[in-house]
Image: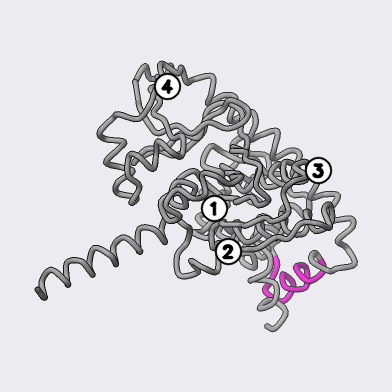
Amino acid sequence: MKDIEIIKPKYTIKDFLDYTGIAYKIDSNNDLLVKSPANPQQKTESLRVRANYKGNYNYFKDFLTDKVGDILNFVEYYYNLDTKQAIELLKDTFNEHNLERLNKIKEKNNIFIQQVQQQLEKEKNNSIEILNIQNLQNQALINYLQSRSINLQTAISANIKEIYYKNTKTNKNYFALAFENKSDGFEVRNKYFKGSFGTKDITVFENQNLSVNVFEGFLDYASAIKLSKNKILNQNNIILNSVAEAKKAVEAIEKAEHIKKVKLYLDNDKAGKEAAQLITEELNKRREDIQVFDYSNTYSASNDLNEYLQKKMLRERNRSAQEEYER
């Protein structure tokens, strides 16, 4: 079983779909939808591939037959193979000699995925009517930020605002935090919802010093402002708003000739690590005068910078309470 022990941690069901060219769609929850092998003529895809908590697409369920499992179970089920045959197929699929051909398939599928995502985003945006965007004053949103260890002044410094909008399909009104990107789109978030309106893009705050900080989300950026006691506000800062925008950050840094140092503060999950690797490798190729440093190891016990801040604030409160008790 040594071969499958190598394959399982390295590849996911999504990789297998991409490499073999099996068609799938992406729904609004970012699940992958595949036609069931039990009924390939079905109009609605019943086989769903979901990401686990680390963002890896390595769990499937076919709601037509109730079959479930990981990448090995998927290959056994999809092609009606025994375990040995499935392992051999996986070995052949991920054979390094096949990567050039397989990468072309993957690139074609990625284009398809982007088109589906853009269409979903367009449909979602068409159902949203923005009523107002204003400075933070909604107490429910302020309370939510405080639950994430971010106070009002820090949020204002991070350029976080509040947005009021209507879902025209349901005719219901909502409010949330809003963080603008460089394409006039918004990252939108409250206690119950996380999404985006308009065009997805990075957010850039420019200064003329020699370094740039790169964050994954705007709550991480606000956390860094608080942790640094506002010092990073005088530095160049890029917020990805999604790891899918990492290449846009590379392009922005490449053009900023005065920047010589890049400090990455991305999440400690697979997606964050892959984005950090992409940014590092691309900048090393494009700019010999730039040094890239990954600072995620400074909060390795936390998933992201905001979780690190929350833990730090909790420790400080507990310490203060203990000192008060001992007096």
Q: Say which label, 3 or 2, has the lower sequence index.
A: 3
Mark 3 neighbour density, 10 Å: few (under 14) some (14–19) many (20 or more): few
What stretch of residues is rendered in magenta? 81-92
From the image, tell me which residue sits under label 3.
108
Mark 1 belongs to which amino acid? Answer: Arg
Q: Is disc 4 placed on a helix, strand or loop?
A: strand
Mark 4 or 1: in front is: 4
From the image, tell me which residue sits under label 2.
295
Quadrant holding the N terminus:
bottom right
Q: Is disc 1 placed on a helix, strand or loop?
A: strand
Viewer-nearest residue: 157 or 60: 157
Vertical relation: 204 (above or below) 220: above
From the image, tell me which residue sits under label 4.
133
Mark 4 or 2: in front is: 2
Asked if residue 91 is among those painted magenta in the image, a careful observer would answer yes
Q: Is disc 3 placed on a helix, strand or loop?
A: helix
**For residue 190, side relative to residue 126 (left or right):** left
Q: Residue at x 62, y 48 (%)?
A: 243
From the image, tell me which residue sits under label 1.
50
**In 3D space, how far apart are the residues under numbered discs 3 and 4 (Cα atoms)?**
39 Å
Task: Tell me if label 4 and label 2 are in contact, CB under 8 Å.
Answer: no
Viewer-nearest residue: 202 or 92: 202
